[in-house]
Image (cartoon, rainbow, N blue to C red):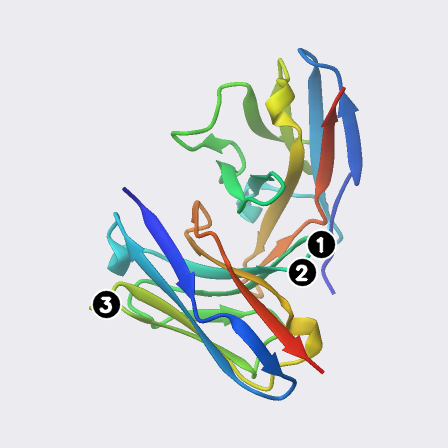
Amino acid sequence: QTVVTQEPSLTVSPGGTVTLTCTSSTGAVTSGYSAIWLQQKPGQPPRALIHSTNNKHTWTPARFSGSLLGGKAALTLSGVQPEDEADYYCMLYYSAAQVWVFGGGTKLTVL
Amino acid sequence: EVQLVESGGGLVQSGESLRLSCAVSGFTFSNSWMHWVRQTPGKGLTWISYINGDGSITSYADSVKGRFTISRDNAKNTLYLQMNSLRAEDTAVYYCANSLALWGHGALVTVSS
């Protein structure tokens, strides 16, 4: 069974920079996995931030960026704002099986 | 304005069936890959299924394969999820999403054992 792993929790100071990562149990994450990053705040549906590894949606704040880092998908927040406190989920597409798999999510605390 | 509105959730007994609907507006539904994703209360997200624009391509997570069926009616701009043989572990909020970019607010399904 394919497992996608994220840091369970991270803490960052306002104005700081933090990188969240997304690892696949099958090996290095490449652009072929079409990584997606979502933000979810309590009581709200998920909101997509990044698609296809590093592409922002029109509504994505400039401080969010996606990349590949050391065989992992990564989401970097630069100049973190208090409103960025949320759960962040990555998704990877496994083309051979034609399925998407979520990571377990990272709870980001801004403190 | 883009809208995705799920409906059809509710309380059912284990082994029963339920059909969720997702009515969409504000984008070209017939061109869109659509997904169902669920979230157990207080837990993480799980991808369930997708369907392509004309309904000719579908895929399912192993946890629902053979029990759930995704379909769409492009004339009605509506996505469906037929859920059969429901189990307690299917209890969740079910979201529909357009290309995993635009999301509805979810419908709660509770399966009582």
Gap between marks 2 and 3, in whole Å? 29 Å
Percent across and percent down for residue A72 are 69, 38
- CB of mark 1 within 8 Å of CB of mark 2? yes
Instruction: Classify residue B45 as left or right of residue B82.
Output: right
- Residue B76 badge: 3
**Mark 1 crowd level (few <14, some 14–19, many ≥20, 10 Å Cα):** few
Q: Quadrant of the N terminus of chain B?
A: top left
* Residue wearing tag 1: B43
Mark 1–mark 3 Cα distance, whole angstroms, equals 33 Å
x and y percentages locating residue B103 in the rendered image: 45, 49
Residue A57's disc number = none
Question: x, y (%) of residue A102?
Answer: 64, 52
> A30 or B104, which lies in front?
B104
Relative to the observer, which residue lies in front, B60 or B102? Answer: B102
- How crowded pointer 2 is (Cα within 10 Å; few <14, some 14-19, many 20+) is rated as some
Work out how far the residue at label 1 is from the one at label 2, CA to CA, in angstroms.
Answer: 5 Å
* SS for dot 2: loop
Query: What is the three-letter code of the residue carrying label 1?
Result: Lys
Residue at left offset 24%, top offset 52%: B28
The chain identifier of the residue carrying mark 3 reads B
Q: Residue at x 58, y 66 (%)?
A: A97
Residue assigned mark 2: B40
> SS at mark 3?
loop
Pointer 1 and pointer 2 on the same chain: yes
